[in-house]
Amino acid sequence: MTVTQKLSRTDMAQRVAADIPEGAYVNLGIGLPTLVANYLGEKEVFLHSENGILGMGPSPEPGAEDDDLINAGKQHVTLLTGGAFFHHADSFSMMRGGHIDIAVLGAFQVSVTGDLANWHTGAEGSIPAVGGAMDLATGARQVFVMMDHLTKTGESKLVDQCSYPLTGIGCVTRIYTDLAILDVTDQGLLVREIVADISFEELQRLSGVPLHQ
């Protein structure tokens, strides 16, 4: 079966943004999660970047980029009124000290028990890029993962046990994919919402791991 309707990356970012509560301190990981900043609307959310920023806003308009104002992924960002810059070490102290409410991270794999693998596939020639992911995975109060449900070759990124090097053990709270939104619970992966034009049975088949409703 071919999935003809699934969430775009913009749709996924909007869906994650809708679940971030007012007043939260949030770190957006490199790549797909950075899109979330553009869809927070008027909510007061304090965006943190591990290179030493608190109070980031959405992406700048074309032509308004400031080369001195970038996030950890070297993307241009804006700064909201009251935003602050500080030392890299202070930024990591915030992450490790439990001061981040939600970390939104990308992933190569997530296990049914919430283990996260997102920094290295182990493939020959690939460049490991752990950055602050391990600190965020263990220090944030909640970890939201944004990822495609399937790899480019059609394998599920939801697995019984991660085969890639781990970023964190049992750290993932919620998973947002282009097919579904799932919570990691003591009973396994709970499907909160199916966002594609497929049945629960088809989602189960594509996922390759036990799911619960």
Image (cartoon, rainbow, N blue to C red):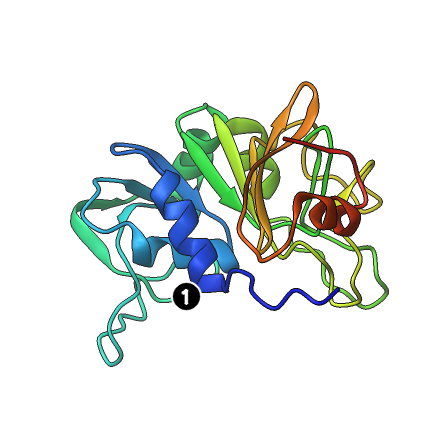
Residue drawn at 70 percent across, 48 percent down: 203
Say which residue appears at 53% left-offset and 51% top-offset: 195
Residue 121, position as x, y percentages in the image: 78, 55
Instruction: Report x, y in % for residue 50.
Output: 44, 45
Q: Residue at x 23, y 51 (%)?
A: 41
| Nearest to the observer: residue 137 or residue 1 | 1
> In the orientation shown, which residue stands out farthest toward the left?
81
Q: In the figure, residue 198 lies in which quadrant?
A: bottom right
Instruction: Tell me the element at label 1.
Output: loop
Residue in view at x 28 percent, y 59 percent: 58
Q: How many marks?
A: 1
Residue that lies at the very extreme toward the bottom in this rendered image: 63
Res 11 seen here: yes
Depth order, front residue of 150/78: 150
Counting from the top left corner in percent of width and height, residue 3 is at 65, 64
**In the image: residue 54, left or right of residue 139:** left
Q: Is residue 72 visible?
A: no
Indicate the quadrant containing the C terminus: top left, top right, bottom left or bottom right.
Answer: top right
Q: Position of residue 30 (x, y in %)?
A: 51, 56
Q: Which amino acid, mark 1?
A: Gln
Residue neighbourhood size for the residue with mark 1, other residues' Cα within 10 Å, grouped as few (<14), some (14–19), many (≥20):
some
Q: Is 167 on the left-hand or right-hand side of 45? A: right
Residue in the foreground of this view, choosing between 61 and 125:
61
Q: Where does the N terminus fall, quadrant-wise? A: bottom right
Residue ID for mark 1:
75
